[in-house]
Amino acid sequence: MANVRFEALKSAFSHNFVELRSEGVKDLRSERVKDYFAQDVFTREKMKEYIAQEVLDQLFDDVDNGRTIHRDIAGVVAIGIRKWAIEHGATHFTHWFQPLTGGTAEKHDAFFTLKDGALLEEFSGESLYQQEPDASSFPSGGIRNTFEARGYSAWDPSSPVFLIGDTLCIPTVFVAYTGEALDYKTPLIRSTASLCHIAREVCGYFDKQVKHVHTNLGWEQEYFLVDESLYNARPDLMLTGRTLMGHNSAKSQQLEDHYFGAIPARVLAFMQELEYEALKAGIPVRTRHNEVAPNQFEMAPIYEEVNLSNDHNLLVMSIMERVAEKHHFRVLLHEKPYAGVNGSGKHCNWSMQTNTGVNLLAPGKNPYQNLQFITFLVNVLMAVHRHNGLLKASIVSATNEHRLGANEAPPAIISVFLGKQISEVLDKLEHASAEEAIIINAKKEMKLGVANIPEILLDNTDRNRTSPFAFTGNRFEFRAVGSSANCGAAMLALNAAVAEQLTLFKEEVDARIEKGEPKERVLFDVIKKYIVACKAIRFDGNGYSDEWKAEAAKRGLDCEQSVPVVIDRYLSESSIKMFERTGVLTRAELQSRCEVKWETYVKKLQIESRVMGDLVVNHVLPAAKRYQTMLLQNVLAVKQVFSADETASLNEMDYHIIKQIERHSGAILEGVEKMTEARHKANRQPNERTKAVAYHDTVLPLMADIREHADALELIVDDELWTLPKYRELMFIH
Ligand code: ADP
Ligand code: MG
């Protein structure tokens, strides 16, 4: 009988670059980006050709100021959209939304209805505005009882509609009829509105010209590629997105020769097509390179407004999967597809920017802007300090759990890296007097007196890779976010935390100014107080070290590692108060989100555990037994040929391996039994949270035990009998 692994290998070797070109994979060298950028997007520019100017003026004004779009406007816009879409080959449309399951969801409808038996091409304002997907199978964490309140999706006009193939996609929010958010987009939009509002008010202390503030996101998407045939021969990759077993390859990432190395031809062809498709969809992807682990890569766009950027990230993830298939690859977005090598994250570069073009997290072009910069910086530190547990909750999941704290990724403790220059500025401010600290010129502009901040920060290049939240010169980089995550979860928590913090800051400052204290004195006092108060969150050292874990606990930072318990942080009184105060999420919405998170955690582990049982019993043990039988036959044969004296030493090696196989196989069988029992027990827990905790505490460790024995067998058993593609094959074939 053919060994599945060797069949897969044979097929993988045939997927070479030359082969693919002959299969018609597009050669893009002759195309110019400016000719196809945003070709599939109904941009504001294109809207002018299809929609009357006064309607557009109203639409853009409403969008830019966060107002609800009037239904009459939607009706007119819908006609323009339909015309453009049909001209570009669309036959269907869908609302495109972001349920709590992760990923995106679509329900396609054709652009026609029947009227008196005749076919009528139609796309009404109503269809643009609102759709009712059969939403009962999307998780709601108990909010949307199927009988009483249905869910609907509603147009988000701040993100442009776009085409995928024959389908017009309309970015939408997804909410219950009772108003609660059932997605990531709704609270993300709410959080941006809240932050932008208060940030603008705080800007008022420094610059009256600022009318509007928005937040930016630039994500860096890491991913693995694996040949499709090998992927198909690994049930664990197919069903769980990661390898549940596999002995480390002798050569892995030690030499770091892959990082920033030349991109292999077949991978490059994939990347080129991916970029082409992404650019056509208006996603400004700009950077591509190899990552640390073999077959690991990264792509990053130019940053955009956070809601749009997040839509673009979700879209890229689905484009990746589609393009990969064309190239006989599978893309792995799981945070830790392979144990023992670098995992995948999605660094979220985040900043705030004014309509006057000032980045509030960049040192100013003139010294007078630096006080504003320090004000925003210190308030972010305060927010991260106050809500460090919650920010961790915003990035945890069953999949990211394997990456956090795994010694080559951000640790499971949130701290902030500032770099030497900024740290020095804060230290000086802490010890300065008000007179030294703030200097006012004749125009009543304030500047920092104690320290000069160069416009370009050296620490920009000081890459402390171990920090989960790093200041990188003109932005914060939230690095703990997982590669498969919807960035919205992390961004909305950060936005909301900073919004709350700025509100507290403004209240305190205003109260004292009202009492007659001079503005600059008050600003200085409060900033100084904050610098002292949030010191515990600042850490520039090695985040992976054990000393840091001990130190962080002493500082009172959240050190919890268990994902189901970290999720509790959403429901702490300080989190609920913060989310309610900023209008981002209600208590009920938070509760429902946690329910969904625990439920998802349980389901993922349940699937993994079952797949694990199946793999060891149906793949690993049979291969081991077969090899053991071969050895036993050899032992008998030796006995027949040689004398009893000679037999003992000749068979020594075989005896040893036979016993090892017996030991590991026995341990595996016992482990599977225990794991199944633990699963059953966990399933009987009274609620999703206790179930998730039980899975974490009992099932997960047993899976690790089983894996250890399976991996040991992989090293012993004859290579020809092993049926699962090995790490070296998964990671080095491209
Ligand atoms: P790195 O060296 O960390 O890989 P890159 O220059 O590749 O940094 O940028 C990473 C991401 O950060 C990109 O998406 C980039 O557009 C984004 N970025 C740069 N400046 C800002 C900013 N001020 N705010 C938000 N994102 C930014
Ligand atoms: Mg990068």
Image: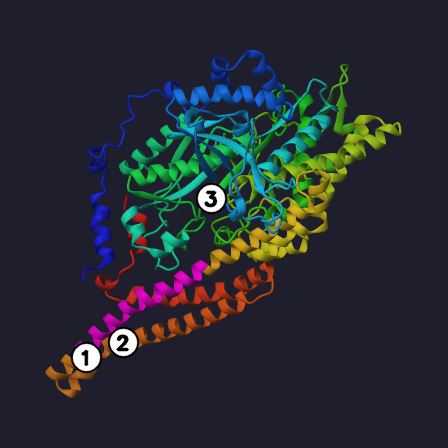
Q: Which residue is mark 3?
A: 483
Helix, strand or loop under label 3: loop
Image height of 261 relative to 574, above or below: above
Q: Give how far across and how far down residue 528 sits, in percent.
A: 75, 36
Q: Amino acid at mark 1?
A: Val
Disc 1 crowd rating (10 Å Cα; few below 14, some 14-19, many 20+) is some
Which quarter shows the C terminus? top left
Label 2 to label 3: alpha-carbon separation: 42 Å
Front residue of this view, candidates 24 and 268: 24
Label 3 to label 1: alpha-carbon separation: 50 Å
Q: Which residue is mark 1?
A: 635
Disc 2 crowd rating (10 Å Cα; few below 14, some 14-19, many 20+) is many
Q: Which residues are magenta?
A: 607-635
- Disc 2 under 8 Å from ligand 2? The reply is no
Q: Give how far across and how far down residue 405 sits, in percent.
A: 52, 53
Dominant SS of magenta comes to helix
Q: Give how far across and how far down residue 307 sits, in percent.
A: 55, 32
User: Can I make out residue 169 in this image?
Assistant: yes
Sequence-first tag of 1 and 2: 1
- Residue at coordinates 48% horizontally, 15% vertically from top-left? 50
Q: Amino acid at mark 2?
A: Ile
- Residue 520 is left or right of residue 628, and the answer is right
